[in-house]
Image (cartoon, grey):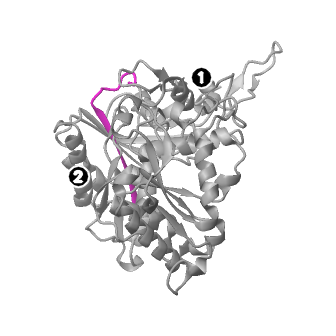
Amino acid sequence: MSGYNASKLPPFSLLDEPQLAFSSDNMSLDVNPLRGLDRYGAYSSATFATYTPALRLASLVPAGGRSRVRDLIETLRSHHAPGDRKEYVPAFRGFEKVFGVPLVGAQTHLAHIKWPDDLDSLGPAGPPHARLLHALRDGMSRLALVRDQFDVALVHLPDAWQVAFRAPGFDAHDALKALGAAHSIPTQVINDRVFTFGYKASLAWRLSIALYVKAGGIPWKLAPLPGVPEDTAYIGLAYALRGDPKEAHYVTCCSQVFDADGGGMQFVAFEARDPVRDIEEARRNPFLSRNDMRAVLARSLNLYQSRNGGLLPRRLVVHKTTSFKPEELEGALDALSAVPEVECVEVASSPGWRGVWLKESRIEGQRSEPDNYPVPRGTVLFRSGTSALVWVAGNAPRASLRNDYYQGKKSIPRPINITRHAGVGPMELTALEALALTKMDWNNDALYDPVPVTIRYSQRLARTIANEPTLPGNTYAYRLFM
């Protein structure tokens, strides 16, 4: 019996599915983002049409794909019944009915750039990726001349050009986003699969949400979380190495301090000043010096203040995927000394744990048996007073249009492991915030992302910035990199 007690896991908690708000008064709520959009419309629908009466699309496409792009736009305007994930996806009623504004092509022909179909004719002589880069630069420069005539640029990169998409030191997607950021042009990349994807409702939801956000709209925000102060904010940090490995520096991409409702879509691109001392250690567990951590968090806090009338948050939570070194904690507390409550939380996405949800056997006297669905989303298993496993993936019946709903449908979901390196308070609150922030990725139509948006956005942006040395350490709107 003593051995049994020693091996027992601690009790678990089950968190409620976080609510999403579709109006500023927090009266229009739903846990399913698509169902909420269908019922209430977008969070910014009351104001979006006043400055964008129609969402206007520019285009950069090969000549042979222009008709397919027009058909795609028509698909987004039309009604579609769900063909997949029917327990989660409602019917798509058409872009204008959902978001309150029509979806149109830019009226000036100068906003529609036609490329040749043949990659060899795309630019001056050179390797394929150089030809594509030339075409992207030329196209974005031409669009910048008519920037007031459109809201988002559609860019079709056909499969036939795949040889040009990647080369040493070059990634077509990252290069396009960097060019867009330089001209303040949000872009939507389209590949050939979009034209043949069979589930039109899912395609329309996914692409329409992305276009709306890139045009400056807000589809949903987080409803107030129980126990979380209104003036709480969040930061996500991700690191990447750039340059010659012998003299590599970190590039940290820091998502803007997210407000308690998940708002705030700017981020800081910051290049560390202190050189890396141990490259191998840095690749295993990247970290910043005290000075660099203080600098990047001070800039991030300044962003929050500029967005909130100079006010400081009462509580600030910093997320990153690796452990906080002592010098990082010191730098964080230096920069955030004026904030009353600071938490530094490690979010690890591959802890190696699994769990099976058991139910009582229908046969009296028999042991419990595995359920037909996985562990419920929101299950929290505490490992210590500062560490917990949180199942952000799992069964989410409240978000279902029918009964149960497991987003992955395959495999046993793994939890994330959260470890608090600084801060106080109940770990349930830290877990609830991480769970809620998995619902704030506006670049897809899923119920949740495998990691909080603080982690997801900063990872994407750090990777892009590391690949694009032309991007200065500056402040950018995230929608330019979606």
Work out whether mark 1 precedes mark 2 in sequence or the reverse, and give the earlier one: 2
Q: Given the image, on which type of amino acid does mark 1 rest? A: Arg
Q: Residues within 10 Å of mark 2 (few under 14, many from 20)?
A: many
Q: Inspect this view and state whether residue 286 appears.
A: no
Left of 126 or right of it: where is 328?
A: left
Left of 83 or right of it: where is 65?
A: left
Left of 43 or right of it: where is 269?
A: left
Q: Which residues are magenta?
A: 224-239
Question: Residue 398 shows which numbered tag?
Answer: 1
User: Residue at label 2?
Assistant: 299
Secondary structure type for disc 2: helix
Q: Inspect this view and state whether residue 337 appears.
A: yes
Q: Residues within 10 Å of mark 1 (few under 14, many from 20)?
A: some
Residue 220: x and y in percent read 44, 32
Residue 272: x and y in percent read 29, 65
In contact (CB < 8 Å): disc 1 and disc 2: no
